[in-house]
Structure formats: C-alpha cells, structure tokens
Image (cartoon, helix red, strand yellow):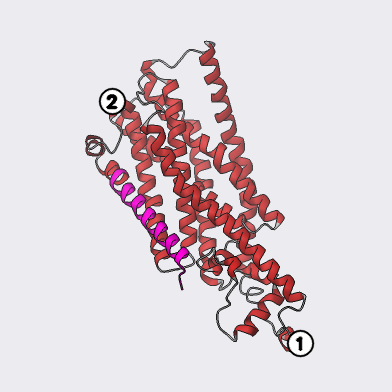
Amino acid sequence: VYTKESRRRYWAVQVIGWIVVLYLCVCRGLSLISYQTASAWGLAESSQDITTAGVAMNKGGAFADVVLYIPMMIVGLIGHRLKARWSNVFFLGAASITVSLPLAWLFTIARARELTPAWKIACTGSHFLVPILLMSPGATYIVYMIVASWNARATLERKDFWARAGYYTSANKDVERESYATGDTRLSLLDNAEAWFISCAWLLLIITTAFFAPIFFENSLDRERQRAGVLPNSSEHNAPTTICFAYIYGQVAVGVTYLIPVLFIGLCGRSMGASWWRVVLTTTASVSAYLPIQPVVGMQYARSAIPHLEADRVGEIIWWAISALLGLWGVGWIFVELVRTMTAPYGTEREQFPLLKRCIIREGEGEEAKFDQEADHADDVDDILLHL
C-alpha cells in the first residue's frame, strides 16, 4: 500500500524517467540514424562546430546509448511500475550512466577546445548547464539508494537488539529451535560467482588505474605546458586525430575521476561489511560496460568518414583489450545481481539478524513482515534489503 509520500516518489521517478527516455530516444536515436537531420533540428552539434571527427565520435556515443543506456532505463521504469525488485539493478545502472555521460562530455569539450582551433564549442552556457541538469536525477537516485540501504540496515540492527533483549515476547524456545535459513545452500553457487567477480574487480581496478591514470595526468601536464608556452598547440592539419583523442580523453577522465574511485569505495565497503556496497558496485558495473563503447565504435565511424585518419594501432589494440575487460566484468556483475534479486526473497543479509527474523515470522503468522515507521522511507523494505 502506497503512502502519500511514497506515491509522490513513485510518480517523480516515473515522470522524470520517461522524460529522460523520450529525450534520449529523440536526440540520440535520431543522431545515430541521421546525424544531419538531428543537427538541422538543433538536437545535435553541427559538423562545422565539432568537425567530421566529432560527428563520428558522437555517433559512437549515440550507438552506446541506443544499445545499453536507453534499454536499461526503459526496463528499469517498467520494473518500477510492476514493483519488481530487479528494477533497482537497471535503475542504478541507468542512473550511473546518467552521471558519467555528461561528465565525459564536459571533459571532452574542455580538452578539444584546448587541442585544436577547429573545435568551436566552449564549455559555457547551455553546453555546461544541460549536462549538469542531466546529471542531477541520476546522482540523486544513487545517493537516495545508498542512504536508504544504510537506514534499512540500522533499522534491522535496532530491532535485532530489542529482540535479543526480550522485547518480542513471541521469541520462545519453539521458535528458537526452528530454522528459517533461506540462503545457506541455495545461494552457494551464486556466492561463489560473486566472490569470483569481486576478485576480478580488484584486478580490474589495478589494470584500469595503471592504464587510465598516466593518460589523464600526462595530458594534464601537457595542457599546463601548452598554457605556459613550453609545448605548441595542435595544428590544423591533424585536427581529426586530436578531436578523436579528445573524446577518448573524456572517457579516460571519467574513468579516473568517477569509475576508479567509486569502484574502490564499493570494494572497501564490502570488505568492511557496509550495507551500501552492492549499490555502489552496481553503479560502477554499468559504467564499466558503457564507458568503452563510444571510443571503440566512434573510431570505426571516424575511419570510414576520414580515410587518412592517423591513429596509434598499438594504443588502439590496448584500448580494445581494456574495453573487453571492463565490458565483460560490468555485464557479468549485472547478471549476478539480477539472478540474486530474482532468487533471494529477502536478501541474504537478513540472515545476519536471525532472532529478529524468527520473531517477525512468528508474530506475523505467515504474513509479510511489516516494519515500523523508521523504515517508511522505502516503498518496499525488501527492495532496499537487496542492496545491503
């Protein structure tokens, strides 16, 4: 049963979510099908402002949106409408992409403007405000889920304390002898897969840091040298190459400033037994799958549009390898989370509060457990518990 506050949250998510989907379908979908039409309608940057290489890289970004971002958003909204617990996995993934996509665009604008005079767009006005506005809903939802999972864990801990203190009088010896364990054997295979993906995440963190950090910081030093006059600015004849690099630099910057720190925080949260670590890792998984798509696909569009495009083949092969690792881990973790949400009725972390669970089941006489007002921030506490 929805309360007045939960109904407001429900409609806020639905309305804002479908507006974002409509915006993405019109702008990004049309850019992929016919970039000239999208540019003529004012839905995409013109080739005079971002050059042919910029158009190619934008089409790569539109491809990433169409194959991953938009479907995740649509499935998440449908699942939210059906009150399906797996909708949180898609929602968190889409929200994380909503944050990373405008961030990459801002880095790209700033770097391309410094690299070549062929780039006409500056990081001012609508090109700065629109990405910030697009980031707001995604960041708000991620913060809400982290806080909600934290509060839900605190509520369970308080209830378990009072249960042990004898507050729930129905916790008698008969109930104590009963077993309500739901995840000891059923989730053994899933737990093994989860542990394997966590180990891979630590390895991936080291690899991406070693690959992304030098590119990000070295080009930051080059930018300072150019401003000081030590290094010359890029000339006009290699503008396509430098603009393609600016787009790649935008993705690398997101990796350094968003993906790597958040992934590290999520892994540390799991090691500490924090309640929010699944929320954080799920956000990084979607970005891991989304981040490499634009450079990989955009470079192919650029090669077909610019026959004599200069590019480092060795660097491109390394990027393909890193992209494959990121994509496989991201898709794999999302799949594991989907399986867990579809098979675990109450979430495995509830087993950390066995006495509380027995008391609630005993008092409820088989009915769904109802939590007190401290947990009313969630539409369904079980949804939040899945991310503990």
Determine which residue is flagged by label 1: 173
Give the CA distance from mark 1 to mark 2: 78 Å
Between 24 and 131, the residue placed more toward the observer is 131
Determine which residue is flagged by label 2: 48
Neighbourhood count class around disc 2 (C-alpha, 10 Å): few under 14, some 14–19, many 20 upward? few
Residue 374, placed above or below residue 357 = above
Quarter of the image holding residue 219?
A: top right
Which residue is drawn at the image coordinates 48% and 31% (left, top)?
249
Residue 207 in sight here = yes
Numbered range of the magenta stretch: 1-27
Q: Residue 13, percent across and down?
A: 42, 57
Which residue is drawn at the image coordinates 29% and 41% (left, top)?
31
Q: Amino acid at mark 2?
A: Gln
Q: Residue 388, percent across and down?
A: 61, 62
Q: Amino acid at mark 1?
A: Lys
Between 108 and 362, the residue placed more toward the observer is 362
Neighbourhood count class around disc 1 (C-alpha, 10 Å): few under 14, some 14–19, many 20 upward? few
